[in-house]
């Protein structure tokens, strides 16, 4: 979707100046939302987090278990390992920690960005990202 | 005396706002969350996301 491609473009443009950290906070009531988050983290166990991340955004609304397995196969992941990772306590715990953190930080919507700790709720346009980053860079030590 | 304290507090708040751009900065544990880019990058973007 648009946000993901904007972030990707910004990362490329400011290569070396940005670090991007992802915190999955799926909707608790939607199993497919939880499954998509787990799929991204499980792909990360085989070094393909970002590939799965972009695939999930490109194939929005295709979050059924079979669709996720198709994604995994397409990325060359070991399907059995992928399944095991998706069901692992490690990733379920990571998501729980993210929920707790989101609550502490009063994150009520996605996406929410923290840029050098400053909070921005909702989607940011390319122009908005650029403005914020330029401001942050001007404050950064040389 | 009270007035002096009030002046000090207001000055502190003004300085704090000016240095932080008027907004608090959260300290976010990065743990082993998925990351991209250099650990030494001057800017860290943390995104809370949902795919649906």
Image (spheres, coloured by chain):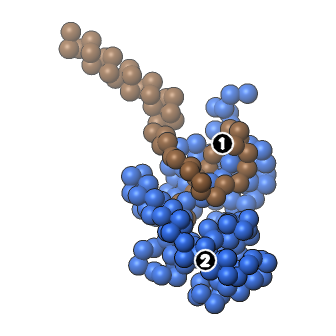
Chain colours: A blue, B brown
Q: Tell me, for residue A71, which label it has, or none.
A: none
Could one spot residue A95 in this view of the protein?
no
The answer to which of A40 and A107 lies nearer the viewer is A40
Q: Chain of mark 1?
A: B
Tell me if residue A12 comes above or below residue A109 in the rendering.
above
Mark 2 crowd level (few <14, some 14–19, many ≥20, 10 Å Cα): few
Where does the C terminus of chain B fall, quadrant-wise? Answer: bottom right
Mark 2, residue position = A84
Of badges 1 and 2, nearer the viewer stands 2
Q: Residue at x 65, y 42 (%)?
A: B43
Vertical relation: A112 (above or below) A80: above
Asked if A69 appears above or below A119 in the picture, the reply is below
Percent x, y of residue A85: 61, 73
What is the C-alpha distance between the residues marked 1 and 2?
Answer: 35 Å
Q: Which mark is residue B43?
A: 1
Residue in view at x 71 percent, y 39 percent: B40
**Front residue (pair B34, A87):** A87
The quadrant of the rendering that contains the N terminus of chain B is: top left
User: Where in the figure is residue B18, as x and y percent of width and height?
Assistant: 49, 29
Residue B29 at x, y = what percent?
52, 47
Q: Is residue A110 left or right of residue A137?
A: left
Question: In the image as oriented, which residue stretches furthest toward the bottom?
Answer: A66
């Amino acid at each position: 979707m648009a946000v993901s491609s904007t972030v990707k473009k910004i990362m490329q443009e400011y290569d070396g100046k940005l670090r991007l950290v992802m915190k999955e906070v799926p909707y608790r009531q939607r199993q497919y939302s939880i499954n998509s988050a787990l799929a991204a983290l499980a792909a990360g166990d085989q070094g393909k987090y970002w590939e799965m991340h972009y695939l999930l955004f490109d194939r929005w609304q295709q979050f059924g278990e079979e669709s996720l397995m198709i994604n995994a196969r397409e990325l060359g992941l070991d399907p059995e390992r992928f399944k095991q990772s998706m069901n692992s306590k490690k990733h379920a715990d990571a998501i729980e920690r993210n929920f707790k953190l989101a609550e502490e930080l009063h994150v009520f919507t996605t996406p929410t960005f923290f840029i050098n700790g400053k909070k921005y709720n909702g989607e940011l346009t390319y122009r908005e990202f650029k403005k914020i980053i330029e401001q942050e860079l001007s404050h950064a030590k040389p | 005396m009270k007035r002096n304290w009030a002046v000090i507090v207001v000055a502190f708040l003004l300085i704090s706002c000016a240095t932080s751009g008027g907004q608090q900065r959260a300290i976010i544990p990065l743990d082993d969350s998925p990351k991209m880019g250099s650990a030494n990058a001057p800017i860290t973007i943390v995104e809370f996301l949902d795919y649906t």
